[in-house]
Image (tube, rainbow, N blue to C red):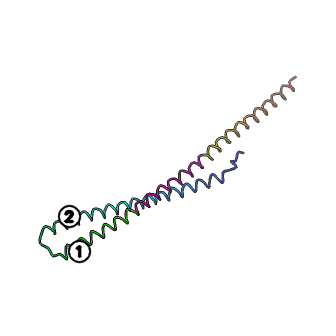
Amino acid sequence: MYQFKLQALLDHHHRQEEVCQKELAEAQRELTDAQQKLKCLKKDKGENIQKLQARQEGRHHISDVLIFIDYIRQLSRDIKTQTQQVDSASENVTHKRNNLIAIMKKRKTLEKLKEKEWLEYQKKMLQVERKFNDEVAATRHIRKS
């Protein structure tokens, strides 16, 4: 009976691949969330700039205008921070993807080796069977003579 010598290692790589796929999916979700938050912050900043411009055209207290300016500055800082988080999340996705690719290559290499060994085993068993059949035929031939 054929048994692949490195089956435990192949099984380990399968499990690692599953874990890496889950980690990649989580990293991609985090990236999407960070990008969505950045998009919302930029939209909020744009809307508040328009509101500020509308207030500046009308006659409003300077304190109202200063509140808008301070809020827009805070949004700018938040956008900068969120942009850094998006960049970090993007790097994390790239890292997780590269890990997954490396593990998949190892697994595929082992699977090719397993297939090659399986074919060699089948070839060897076929040779053994032929040899046995030849011996049986030779024995029958000797008995008939």
Q: How many residues crowd around disc 2 within 10 Å: few (fewer than 14), some, or many (20 or more)?
A: few
Residue drawn at x 14%, y 73% as measured from the top left: 60
- Pick the front one: 97 or 29: 97
Q: CA distance from mark 2 to mark 1?
A: 14 Å
Which quarter of the rendering shows the N terminus? top right
Please give the label number shown on residue 23: none
Amino acid type, label 2: Gln
Residue 59: percent from the left, percent from the top?
A: 11, 72
Which quarter of the rendering shows the C terminus? top right
Image position of 46 (left or right of 28): left
Q: Check disc 1 and report its element: helix, strand or loop.
A: helix
Splitting the image into 4 quarters, where does residue 133 fall? top right
Residue 52: percent from the left, percent from the top?
A: 19, 68
Residue drawn at x 42%, y 59% as measured from the top left: 87
Q: Write the start and end of the magenta stretch as one range.
A: 85-108
Image position of 97 (left or right of 139): left
Q: How many residues crowd around disc 1 within 10 Å: few (fewer than 14), some, or many (20 or more)?
A: few
Indicate whether 124 appears above or below 61: above
Residue drawn at x 70%, y 47% as measured from the top left: 3
Q: Which residue is mark 2?
A: 50
**Residue ranking furthest to the left:** 59
Image position of 137 (left or right of 58): right
User: Is residue 102 located in the magenta-colored stretch of the structure?
Assistant: yes
Q: Which residue is mark 1?
A: 67
- Pick the front one: 24 or 143: 24
Indicate whether 60 appears above or below 16: below
Indicate whether 61 appears above or below 89: below
Amino acid type, label 1: Ile
Residue drawn at x 34%, y 62% as measured from the top left: 38
Residue 76: percent from the left, percent from the top?
A: 31, 66
Splitting the image into 4 quarters, where does residue 65 fall? bottom left
User: Is residue 115 located in the magenta-colored stretch of the structure?
Assistant: no
